[in-house]
Amino acid sequence: MDNQNKPEVTRESGWEREVIEKLALAAITEQTRARRWGVFFKSLMFVYLIAVFGVAMYPKLKQDIGVDSKDHTAVIDVVGMIAEGKEANADSIIESLRNAVKDKHTKGIILHANSPGGSPVQSSYVYEEIRKIKKEHPELPIYAVVSDICASGCYFIVSASDKIFVNPSSLVGSIGVLMDGFGFVDGMQKLGVERRLFTAGAHKAMLDPFSPSKEDETQYIQSLLNQVHQQFIGAVKAGRGDRLKENPDMFSGLVWTGEEGVKLGIVDGVGNQDYVAKELIGAETQVDFSRQEHLLDKIAGKLGASFGQVIGSLVQGASLR
């Protein structure tokens, strides 16, 4: 009886094995297909991220495509606080100006001004660069267009341009120099706090907010401010020339509306960027030549600042400030 049943068991086992093998093969095929699609979509996502990262690192890539084949007006931002390390700094603005000048299809330059001012040194660097460009390329017009505000160091810069255009409600001027601080001497006395300050050099602690002010030091600082103020005034007069209608308040640090500024001769007229590009420069297409900070530079800057703070917190002792 056992020998007669064996062939049937064998046939039944072979059938089950074949089914199992087919199911296993189908599962392996499905896994392989899924893995291939997974690799495809991961590769696609990787390419997409690379493209996004590239645009983030080089944000001007999009706007520069095709520029070389068409005449245009170059636009350069003078926006925000003017200071080294800030977005509006001399290196950045000067590099943007030089790039615009090098482009053979640049028919004119617009300085988009919207700044409360800042460093007189940074402002002076840009002012001198504009004067240099005007001397070397007299056929290339440089105009300034003010949006909200162009005060102090910002006005220092734009006074070198050929003409300045504003909105009637823009704020312009503030031809003056400022240095501010605080004094805590009386407050420390009321709190019973003793100031312990050690220096090498009679005036090393000049303007220390926790020590009484000294008359000779105050006069010295005022003389420095007066010198910088006269440099500012001289630059404005050289840039604006006979257009200025001088009065006792012109160099006092006051600001005026764009409408009043036209009457005083500190600006030339009312107009926006589109008007200047189309009607005065004759190149309606505007191309932003403002230098953009690359993403890696921003990351490196933040890391560098964080590292510097850590190191600074560890280092104690004398400093040359």
Image (cartoon, rainbow, N blue to C red):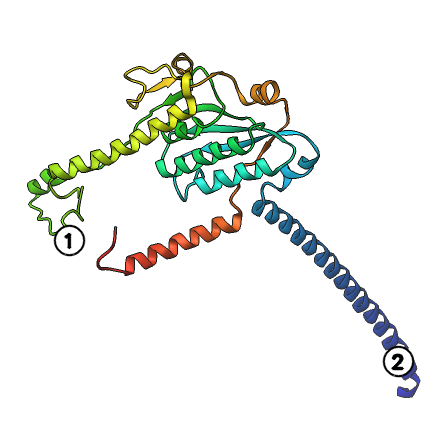
Q: Name the residue located 58 percent from the left edge and 19 percent from the top edge.
A: 280
User: Along the horizontal axis of the image, is 219 left or right of 137?
Assistant: left
Q: Residue 294: in sight, yes or no?
A: yes
Q: Give the image location of residue 8, x and y in percent.
A: 91, 79
Badge 2 density bin: few <14, some 14–19, many ≥20, Cα 10 Å: few
Disc 2, SS:
helix
**Which of the labelled discs sits on residue 154, or is there none?**
none
Considering only vertical position in the picture, is 320 above or below 86? Answer: below
Please tell me in which quadrant of the rendered image residue 19 appears.
bottom right
**Which of the labelled discs sits on residue 10, or is there none?**
2
* Residue hosting label 1: 199
Considering only vertical position in the picture, is 134 above or below 90? Answer: above
Badge 1 density bin: few <14, some 14–19, many ≥20, Cα 10 Å: few
Q: Give the image location of residue 122, x and y in percent.
A: 39, 38
Q: Give the image location of residue 301, x and y in percent.
A: 44, 51
Amino acid at the residue labelled 1 = Thr
Q: Name the residue located 77 percent from the left edge and 64 percent from the top edge.
A: 27
Mark 2 near mark 1, Cβ–Cβ under 8 Å? no
Taking depth in this image into account, of 316 and 224 the one nearest to the observer is 224
Taking depth in this image into account, of 181 and 165 the one nearest to the observer is 165
Q: Name the residue located 31 percent from the left edge and 15 percent from the top edge.
A: 247
Please tell me in which quadrant of the rendered image residue 308 appears.
bottom left
User: Along the horizontal axis of the image, is 171 left or right of 15?
Assistant: left
Amino acid at the residue labelled 2 = Thr
Q: Residue 119: in sight, yes or no?
A: no
Taking depth in this image into account, of 198 and 202 the one nearest to the observer is 202
Image quarter where the N terminus lies is: bottom right
